[in-house]
Amino acid sequence: MTDTLLRFAGVSHSFGSVLAVDEVSLAIRRGEVFSLLGPSGCGKTTLLRICAGFQRPDRGRIILDGADLTDLPPEKRQVNTVFQNYALFPHLNVFDNIAFGLRIARRPEAEVRREVGRMLELTDMGEHAGKRVEAISGGQKQRVAIARALINRPLVLLLDEPLAALDLKLRQRMLVELDSIHDEVGITFLYVTHDQGEAMSISDTIAVMNRGRVEQIGSPAEIYEAPQSSFVAAFIGDTNFFDGAVREADGDYCRVAIEGFADVLLFNDKKVRPGGAVHLSLRPEKLLILQEPPPAGEERRNTVRGIVEEVVYLGAATKYWVRVGEYRLAVYRQHRRFLLDEKPIKWGDSVWLNWHADDGYMLERYSEADEELLSLPDTGFEAEAGSPPGPAPEEGK
Amino acid sequence: MNRFPSPRPPLPAPAPAAGRKAEWLLTLPSLAWLLAFLLAPTLLVFAFAFRRATPYGDIGDGWTLDTIIHLASPNYPAVVWRTIYLSAAATCLCLALAVPVGYCLARLAPRWRQLAILAVTAPFWINFLIRVFAWKSILAIGRPLHSLLARLGAIEPNQPLLYTGWAVLLVMIYTHLPFAILPIYAAAEKFDFNLLEAARDLGSSAAGAFRRVFLPGISRGLLTAGIMVAVPCLGSYVIPDLVGGTRSEMLGNKIAQYVYLERNLPRASALSAILTLTVVALLLGFLRWSDNRLRQRLDAAPARADREGGRP
């Protein structure tokens, strides 16, 4: 799985004076699900449209399977798109929508029937073949759109926010179906979404985009656990940011003085020397919230004391806001066991927060503006319901 | 599957008899109006076709099939045929011109669109007769257009442009083009242009996408435009009268000739009946088509009610 199928080489595109895509270079491997993840206006849809051929980039090349696509019109490219609002042809029924690509290619009718039948089976739409597209539900339209795009056997399937128009439950179900369709057909997916939960659950690789640039490329776990920038840390999941200076460095670990907070022990993977400034991201679920002081003698753990300022019950977990010095930390506590006689942690309680030195992560790039992402309306436990409220109009439409 | 089925509200009962009665009562005045002032006069016209003509230009007594038999005389089919082909040609050319215009209008930025639509409707601000007279002077011999065509060798120096079938066709297209553009624009404006991208994406050329997706997408507008042009074209009188010659007269002129010059009302009535029946046949075809479309849409509607989540 190391050969590159699709490559974006230094692609830039602007609309008027707005730079939508800024020097993006990506390598997408054969057979993988590659997601472009970012907030609306980050350039991900423009990049997809450039790949499909609806937009010509100002600069840069797109190479598919060794051939330069940049100057080809959409119909000459071996890629197909699942559009955000499906874009099914209203004057054709389900069968004819799926058959469209083959009929354009003037394939014999027997082959059309066979291939459409195969697609209907793959997407479990066999019984709806004769229905008008107005007569089927959103989830079914989604499947027709996928079948219609797959029937041409593209090298890459481009998916533009394919689940954005569906409600939450259906979205989760379709996500699983998309995943199994991918396993079945083995076609490379280029998946555009603003929903981190979607991207995390379906992707082999995620490219996080912000303001037309790629912030970080990596597996979902890498992106989540080892964010390079404050944008990635804040956009994906929830986190706490700190800035401090290394006081002493000793082998793999260092001690960081954080003004207005505490001195904390931190894994020093970036080999920062004493005196160096560091920015730190600490995921809320990595923090242990305790009503009593933690047992002494634990290796490489940090402990601070704080006051609970806010308690938000989320079902699967509770989110606490804990004041420690000048900082207000977000903390998640999973409800592993629920005991009625347990003394709950309440507003105003004094608590201990405890975490392992390895769980804080040093960021390479930090921007204060990204803290804004954290103060967004808090919708809950990340990945579950933590998606932004709905698709905002994308750029380049 | 569904462990907590929620009771569904009952479907609304079919309209009771009282509702039907009210419906009839409400429709009655307009029905009466149509009967008295549209259907009755039309039937009278039909009936006149079977009466005798008097030398004084009145409707005589007794019934005859003479007029109908006279319709078979060799000079009628030419007029009928000319009326049909001129109207058909005008309709097709109007549509051919209006489709790209409608497409462009729908894709214009809203600000420019307003202006462009104003431009399309601008001719309506000038009296129809004046506009036709304007064409008389544009097409006349010695005018720039005529001189230009003559110099290019397209016509003989003293060959008239006016008083030909071509002049009639040109002015009919000119007159009816806005009636074709507006319905096509209205349909194109509702058209989802993403569908063209989807077609391109699936391997269709730009022209193929236009033909396979855009034209079916605006089919209703095309049909409406066709009717809006064809019906008045079939009934043309002023245009062939002013810019056409004796070899390009249409049914409308023939009818006028029988009413005013030959004072033979039965023959005028017979020709009018032919015209009316042609138009009615066209409209019935249109109604049937749009009725089918509507029924398909209604059939599609109930399935939409249990959208999402209704899947096993």
Image (spheres, coloured by chain):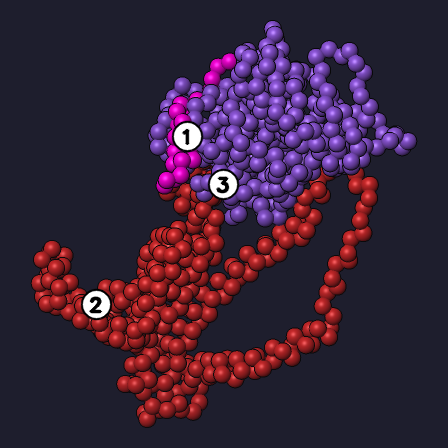
Chain colours: A purple, B red
Q: Where A171 sits versus B38, above or below? A: above
Above or below, comparing residue A177 to residue A3 in the picture: below
**Is A18 within the magenta?**
yes
Residue A162, image x and y in percent?
57, 36
Magenta stretch: includes residue A220: no
**Amino acid type of the residue that numbered disc 2 sits on in the rendered structure:** Thr
Residue that numbered label 2 is attached to: B164
**Chain letter of disc 2 in the image:** B
What subunit carries mark 1? A
**Can residue A57 be seen in the rendering of this structure?**
yes
* Quarter of the view holding residue A234: top right
Residue B203 picture quarter: top left
Q: Taking A241 as reference, is B86 left or right?
A: left
Cα distance in 3D space between marks 3 and 2: 56 Å
The residue shown at (87%, 31%) is A343
Identify residue for label 3: A394
Q: Give the total number of marks visible in the rendering.
A: 3
Above or below, A37 against B239 in this view is: above
Q: Name the quadrant of the C terminus of chain A.
A: top left
